[in-house]
Amino acid sequence: MVEEQRIFKQEPLLFLKPTSSNLANGGTIEIPASMEHLWYEAELTVFIGKKDRDVSESEALDYVVGYALGLDMTAKELQATIKAAGLPWLLAKGLDTFKPISEMKGPTKSDMILKVPYLISHISTITTLVEGDVILIGTSEGIGPVKPGQKITAGIAGLIDNHFDAEK
């Protein structure tokens, strides 16, 4: 996962979400009983198709097998406490079903956002990328609160249409 870091723009803020966070289109986001403030961020999702480390920016898109729309779910009350204590964001972002993702679409390099090759290259200098890795690209737009009983619809007109329920 990648999220725009608002204080230090030079380097992206990175955090991990476990595979137990994955949720297919049409699934139900499970809001833990103790959580009151849950937020979503709609994000471009990049699927990695082969293993490597220290990937150059010029070769980065060769590792992409497809794109999707993902929702980065965050338990905001946990995040505030965690950030203040300097703890990993995994605790607020890595809960079960907190990574809803649409079906993967094939790569379209001509439609790429310029920072995707940089992010793939940057991440690969820190950790080895492997087939099946998923990178969500952070956003400052497309965010909002989620309440129990809410139906979330997110998409890209004519390309992706996601639907998720949120329940406690």
Image: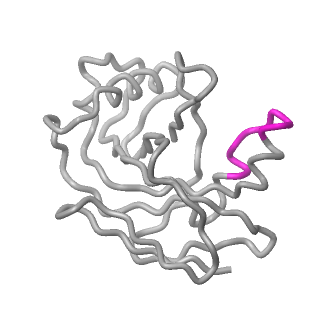
Lateral position of residue 22 relative to residue 60, left or right: right
Which of the 4 quarters of the picture holds residue 115? top left
Colour scheme? one colour
Instruction: From the top left corner, tell me how far across and down residue 60 is, in percent.
Output: 29, 26
User: In this view, which residue lies farthest toward the bottom?
Assistant: 149
- 21 to 127, vertically: above or below: below
Lateral position of residue 153 relative to residue 74, left or right: left
Query: Which contiguous range is marked in magenta?
Result: 83-92
Which of the 4 quarters of the picture holds residue 136? top left
Q: Nearer the viewer, residue 147 or 109?
A: 147
Instruction: From the top left corner, tell me how far across and down residue 168 is, in percent.
Output: 68, 80
Instruction: From the top left corner, tell me how far across and down residue 125 is, in percent.
Output: 48, 19
Q: How many marks?
A: 0
Q: Residue at x 17, y 64 (%)?
A: 158
Which of the 4 quarters of the picture holds residue 69? bottom left
- 160 to 45, vertically: above or below: below
Instruction: From the top left corner, tell me how far across and down residue 25 is, in percent.
Output: 39, 71
Q: Nearer the viewer, residue 123 or 127?
A: 123
Q: Which residue is drawn at 50% across and 61% down?
A: 22
Q: Which residue is drawn at 77% across and 75% down?
A: 33
Q: Which of 50 and 142 is in front in this view?
A: 142
Q: Which residue is drawn at 59% across and 68% down?
A: 146
149 is within the stretch colored magenta: no
The majority secondary structure of the magenta stretch comes to: helix
90 is within the stretch colored magenta: yes
Lateral position of residue 129 relative to residue 96, left or right: left
- 46 to 20, vertically: above or below: above
